[in-house]
Image (tube, rainbow, N blue to C red):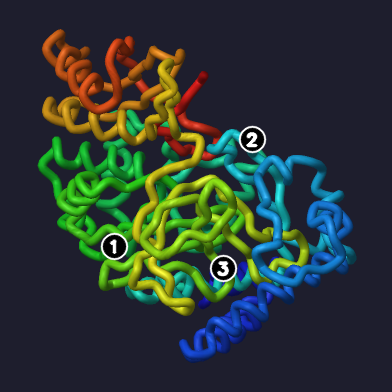
Amino acid sequence: MNWFKISLQLNKFPINRAQKLLREIQDIPESEYHSYLEKQRKSIVNYHLANNTNYKNFFGSPSFLSWEEVPVMQKSDLQHPLKERLSDSFNKNNTYIGKTSGSSGHPFIFAKDRLCHALAWAEFIDRYQWMDIDLNKSLQARFYGIPLDFFGNLQERFKDRMSLRRRFNIFDLSEQKMEIFLNRFKRSNFDYINGYTSAILLFAKYLSRKGIVLKTICPTLKICIVTSEKLFEKDKKQIEKSFGVPVINEYGASEAGLIAFENPEGEWVVNSEGLYIEILDDEDKVLPYGEEGRVVITSLYNKAHPMIRYDIGDIGSLSRKSSFKKPILQTLTGRTNDVAVLANGKVVPGLTFYYVTKSIIEDTGSIKEFVIFQTELDRFKIEYVSEEPFTAVQIQKILVAIEIFVGKNLKVDFEQKSFLKRNKSGKLQQFSSLV
């Protein structure tokens, strides 16, 4: 029984039609793909100019001559009532309504028309088949958060049951909970793991301490797919060693769907069927392949709500091996708001602190997780979960490394915690500036 497809059809999402459209797009030869993208970009912009008053006002003119004229949308542009942003003939009853997690500090509600939402799922089905995962048959161990209110919780668990997903609630990642996780794997034939990187990494470290390789107790396990949070190469090796299966990198967003998925050759292939991805500089100019800038996304089929040249808030680059039909994501280095501005005006990517601190902290083997906050221009706070508090020697090593790689005369506070606070969806923000 194709439970996953049935669940989509029951919710009036035309998955068969979407899969047919996806196959037609994939059959377009490389030589004609640029023309397809140009035609579809123009079509979706003209549709919203004709059918969406809010977008027409945002655009500033009734028509456009070149793609470069199309204004870039920020998250803040979408933070007003949804009914004001919907296109003509669309409402909350005939669209898919979702909400961003707000990890960038700019949460908002969005909508997709039913075909657009079905196309996003068709793309997921297609990519998962690369890894021999069938969403209609393969059992998923799902490391995600879950709504805590009664009806939201009930609805999510029903969706899980219909979609062959078994939820591992990551709001409690204590040793006792990890033991429960382990026992579920012992008695279930999971095909794959999917979820937030930080929670999956924590489980992998737990298994390492126990001297257990997950596949030995769950032989049906094929792969682990991590999403929503950055995967470092060292963490990837840790997960693969502890699980005994390959780790696949997925990049997506609730408002855009699947953005990129790692293929069997290790390439992070961008979704060029339903999306158009650009890398822009600070002046909204397109950067050439290989150069790093802002990731900007256009949803080519969303008629209910414009997502056109939408700045998703991430920094990344496309490989020089990219083509119009097969763009390849080369780097994804963090969010645009993950930067620290020091008192002397120096701007430092938040990941700099993470790399520095991570390399030293992991020498101890007892540090489970940590996050970093900038509390003042010259002051930072490291919160960490560990069996023992940092020693004076460990603290000094971190301070020296920060002075070398970040800047001098910086104050750093350390606080040992029993657990780290995640956002409502269960994500863990590794670096945050509170300045």
The correct choice, above or below, for 172 with respect to 399 in the image is: below
Which residue does the numbered mark 3 point to in the structure image?
A: 276
Give the side of residue 149 with respect to residue 173, left or right: right
Q: Residues within 10 Å of mark 1 (few under 14, many from 20)?
A: many
Q: Amino acid at mark 1?
A: Ile
Q: Residues within 10 Å of mark 3 (few under 14, many from 20)?
A: many
Q: Residue at x 31, y 33 (%)?
A: 352
Which residue does the numbered mark 2 point to in the structure image?
A: 149
Q: Which residue occupies the foreground of this view, 364 or 214?
A: 364
Q: Secondary structure at mark 3?
A: strand
Q: Earlier in the sequence, mark 2 or mark 3?
A: 2
Q: Secondary structure at mark 2?
A: loop
Locate residue 41, reporting x and y percent.
Answer: 67, 73
Q: Amino acid at mark 2?
A: Asp
Q: Earlier in the sequence, mark 1 or mark 3?
A: 1
Which residue does the numbered mark 1 point to in the structure image?
A: 223
How far apart, in angstroms, are the residues tagged by discs 1 and 2? 32 Å
Q: Residue at x 41, y 50 (%)?
A: 195
Q: Amino acid at mark 3?
A: Tyr
Q: Secondary structure at mark 1?
A: strand
How far apart, in angstroms, are the residues tagged by discs 1 and 3? 28 Å
